[in-house]
Every structure is written in C-alpha cells, then in structure tokens.
Amino acid sequence: MIEKQQEMTDRKIWISGEVQADVGDPFKKATHPVEAALNRLLQGVPFGGKVEDWTFIAIIRQEDHPYYDEVVRKSAKGKTLEFRLKIPHEEFSSASPDGQIRLILQALSRSVMLMGKLGISVEAQNALQTALFRAEQELTGPSRRT
C-alpha cells in the first residue's frame, strides 16, 4: 500500500484517452510504457509555479464531434495542466506498435508547445521536450530491439 501511495505521489504525467473501441487495446499497450518512461524521466523536472502534474487525454475517433473538442487548460488551483488533443484515427489504427508510440509522443510534444499559453517557461518546455525525446529513444529506438 505504501509503495502504491509513493507511486501516485511520484507521478508527473497521467495519460488517458477518449478512444474508439477498435483502437482501445493498442492505445493501452502504447500508453503504458510511455507513461512509465515519462514519469521516471520527469522526476526532478519542475514545471514551474504551482504546477505539479500534466494530464494528457488523447482523442482518437473516426468521426469528429463537438463533444470531443481539443482542450488546453490549467486547473482552478493551478496545479494541473490538462490537454485533450486529437490523434488521427486512421493514422493510429494503421500504425505499427512503435508508430503508435510515436503518435502519442508527438501529441504530447504538441501539448508541451501549448504550455506557453498556460504560463510554463520556455526552459521548462525544453526540459519536457528532452524527456519526450529520451522516451522515444528508449521505447522505439534501435537499442530496444536487441
């Protein structure tokens, strides 16, 4: 129980999705290693100000609908950055597992670029982009295929 509580307090990023059922399992398989790698790589990396965590919700749907608009916001208390960003369904469903990881990382990179609108410094954004690059190298790079 204590280990689980520690894991929750160490979490810097939380990834979820509003995805169609046909890509649900591949999405889960792609996001779990991404989330784990980023939470490890982001330890000690400050967002700045009161911000403590980053929430990313991927939207992967065949048909566009106003209920699934993109969202970029900071929580009322200013502790959480929330991003709901679209990933093209056809691209995701036809991608290899590594390609699906890359699409998620690209959407996360886009969320970092949007953080400036929420008052996150360029330095913090650069540190986050570096973590994304390292995660991509770890999860899809040639050294993984040994």
Image (cartoon, grey):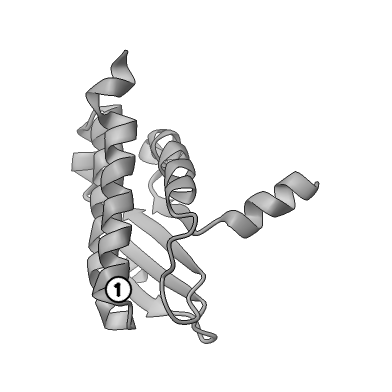
Tell me which corner region of the image, top left, top right, bottom left or bottom right, holds residue 23: top left
Residue drawn 41% across the image and 76% down it: 48
- On screen, residue 116 versus residue 15, left or right, reads left
Where is 32 relative to 127, above or below? above
Name the side, left or right, on which 88 lies relative to 118: left
Q: Name which residue lies at 43% across and 61% down.
A: 45
- Residue 68 horizontal/vertical position (percent): 34, 66
Residue 63 shows in the view: no
**Residue 146 at x, y percent in the picture:** 32, 13
Does residue 56 lie above or below 27 as drawn?
below
Residue in front for this viewpoint, 65 or 117: 117
Q: Is residue 105 visible?
A: yes
Residue on which disc 1 sits: 115
Viewer-proximal residue, 82 or 65? 82
Residue 69 at what x, y percent from top left?
30, 70
Q: Position of residue 112 (x, y in %)?
A: 28, 65
